[in-house]
Image (cartoon, rainbow, N blue to C red):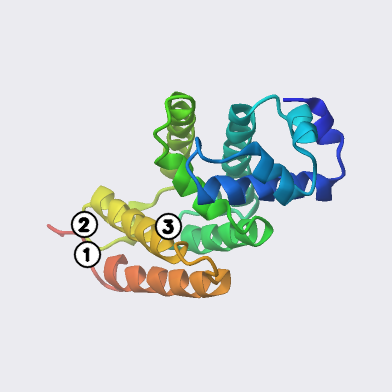
Amino acid sequence: MNEKFFSLPIEKQEAIINAGYRVFSENSYKKSPMSEIADAAGISKSLLFYYFHNKKELYLFLWENCAQLTIEELTKSGCYEQKDLFEAMYKGTQAKVRIMRRYPEIGKFTLKVYYEKDPEVRADIQKSIAKYADFKQNVKQLNFDSSQFVPGIDIEMMYNDMYWASEGYIWERIQDEKYDVDMMERDFLKMVDFWKSIYLRKEGEHDEGN
């Protein structure tokens, strides 16, 4: 990638990034033309190629930017420091909402990338996804306090249940071109409260066998 991109004013960088997220989120990798991204960013196609040598370089940059930005915001919010899983989820939701306000199409882009099959980028994306998945798994284990949950619960199944429900909810919402980030935040926080009512240990509840 041409370092000239990073010498641009932040608003110009943001315009190019947002344009890339929008076009790649609306099409497959193969059917996302660089000319359309350039038009959306308000620059010429030749200038876009000056900053990014080819479409693959731009696509992978946008994905890495998305992943790094997410981890930075989650870290800044204190999400990874929490021993209470649901407090971490509250903070994580607020962090992701901040990102979506800054980059409205980043959610759609992330899902598109995750399911992209094009052989030109698939191997690179899968390798990157595995790297960040390992990071999240390691961080999750650091401050995980299992005593907060109801006795005898299958922790892994509980976590997967919430993760799959969250992914399904996001997928449904972002199909709407005018999805409301504030409504998504409210709905997700309601979901977290519901999970707390099911999974959290009640006062005076003891482990099985005690």
Circle 3 is placed at which residue position?
85
Given the image, on which type of amino acid does mark 3 rest?
Leu
Secondary structure under tag 2 reads loop
Closer-to-camera residue (131/16): 16
Foreground residue, 184 or 151?
184
Rate crowding at label 2 as few (under 14), some (14 to 19) or many (20 or more) other CA atoms within 10 Å: few
Instruction: Pinpoint residue 58: horizontal percent, then vertical percent.
Output: 64, 33
**Distance CA(mark 3)–CA(mark 2):** 14 Å
Residue 157 in the image: x percent, y percent? Answer: 24, 51
Q: Is residue 142 visible?
A: no
Q: Quadrant of the N terminus?
A: top right
Residue named by callout 1: 206
Residue found 59% across the figure and 48% down from its top: 23
**In the figure, is residue 99 to the left or right of 83?**
right
What residue is rendered at 44% in x and 58% in y? 84
Type of the residue with mark 1: His
> Residue 180: image x %, image y %?
55, 72
| Towards the viewer: 107 or 82 | 107
Residue 153, numbered label: 2
